[in-house]
Image: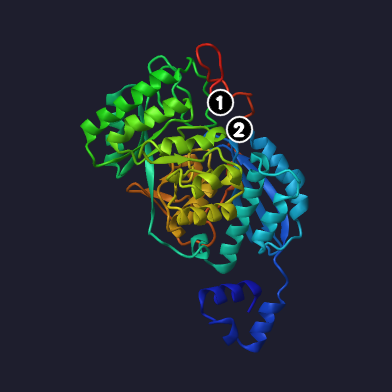
Amino acid sequence: MNRRTLLKAFSAGTLGAAAQLPARAQTALRGLPPLTVRDVRVILTAPNGIRLVVVKVETSEPGLYGLGCATFTQRAFAVATAVQEYLRPFLIGKDAGRIEDVWQSSFVSSYWRNGPVLNNAMSGVDMALWDIQGKRANMPVYQLLGGKCRESADVYAHASGRDFQEVADNVRKAMEQGYRYVRAQVAVPGQSTYGARGAGATPSQPGQSARPRAAWEPATYVRLAPKLFEFLRAKLGEEVELLHDVHERVTLPQAVRLCKDLEPYRLFFLEDPLPPEEIDHFRIIRQQCSTPLATGELFNNPHEFVPLISNRLIDFIRIHISQIGGLSPARKVAALGEYFGVRTAWHGPGDVSPVGHAANLALDLACYNFGIQECTGFGANTREVFPGCPEIRDGAMWAGDAPGLGVDLDEKLAAKFPAPPVRGDDGWGSTRRRDGTVIRP
């Protein structure tokens, strides 16, 4: 019996417990050489026009490799350099099964840490090692994390429009497709609005190339948003859970006022009323209203999210898991949240690769405190480049039973969709108030 067959049979239970193995088989299992990292490569591709960064970790066992998401689309080439020039020589020869040790040693390998470029580079490796571990065990990664708590993960749809009626029509379309959770955004006339189509609108997905054509003034938006949800509740009733993304573009007093004005419309959550630089202000909002709060997609550092979770200042953690270093740290965040009543709502727009979505889904299925999952779906090109994309149906994301993360990558096809060159402006950093002040983000 060869090494791979022995491992598969053992993990499948057909050989029984290790103590029950024949002495010769036990000796063979113990005597196997460690599975080591043979090479680390980066694949840059953009099948949907958005730069995706995928790391491929090859092992000493021929044909056995893992894939991980390292997508920081705004700095994709910097991440690729960090992987190829720094992590690759650091990792070659290391034991591929020592996932935590690899993560911890990589974390301090550059001395300075908690930056988005290093974190995404580490995430690509980390997810790939989990993918390898699942393939070795002949199990999906969610089984390695403890098995399913649920059969699928509810996802929310994105609905926007130029006016209230168009938003309502698009929410209803999502409901007809089986979605029970919908994020609703409306354009502010004549302004550069986040997440909504129409004159002056900025891109709703990071990485999409579109320059805003108008300025942004938060006061008009803060007055308009509650009226949108008053209209939606009147038109749609209580059958749908509604979400909304502020995207951090208001002051603290405006954020407090907005959260209070939205209370009557019972949102599932309000996302990012404040930027990460002002996390202490969440306490002020919490003291004044009951609107559920979600935040975290810009977080890189535990100092940003640990206080919010441990002080129960938010209801949903929205981390983009490659931004904090991958699956290993994200499962710890989920465990921390469980003890403080904070649910997960991992960031999942178009600038998360299907590999990253599969990692999100593994956590969604295995973590008791799952809340909701963002996923914009996978276009035809993306599905061809990444065979095994998670399936979305009836408003939920479903995983298969393939070992590992379950997603593969066709490198030849990926090469037909090269990552777009850097323009210097992918839609962020150019949104300004009428007086010229830059808006964050």
Residue 253 falls in which quadrant of the image?
Answer: top left
**Residue 249 image label:** none
Q: Are marks 1 and 2 in contact (CB under 8 Å)?
A: yes
Q: How many marks?
A: 2
> x%, y% of residue 273?
45, 32
Q: Residues within 10 Å of mark 1 (few under 14, many from 20)?
A: many
The amino acid sitting under disc 1 is Trp
Residue at 42% over, 25% down: 254
- Classify 136 as above or below 56: below
> x%, y% of residue 439?
53, 22
Q: Quadrant of the C terminus?
A: top right
Query: Which residue has dot 2 on it?
Result: 74
> x%, y% of residue 300?
60, 42
Residue at 45% over, 51% down: 390
Q: Earlier in the sequence, mark 1 or mark 2?
A: 2
Instruction: Determine whether the residue tagged by mark 1 lies in a helix, strand or loop.
Output: loop
- Classify 291 as above or below 399: above
Q: Is residue 235 left or right of residue 181?
A: left
On the question of residue 376 being in view, the answer is no
Query: Which residue has dot 1 on it?
Result: 428
Along the line of sight, which residue is nearer the eye, 112 or 191?
112
- Classify 399 as above or below 276: below
The amino acid sitting under disc 2 is Gln
Which mark is nearer the camera, 1 or 2?
Answer: 1
> x%, y% of residue 99?
65, 60
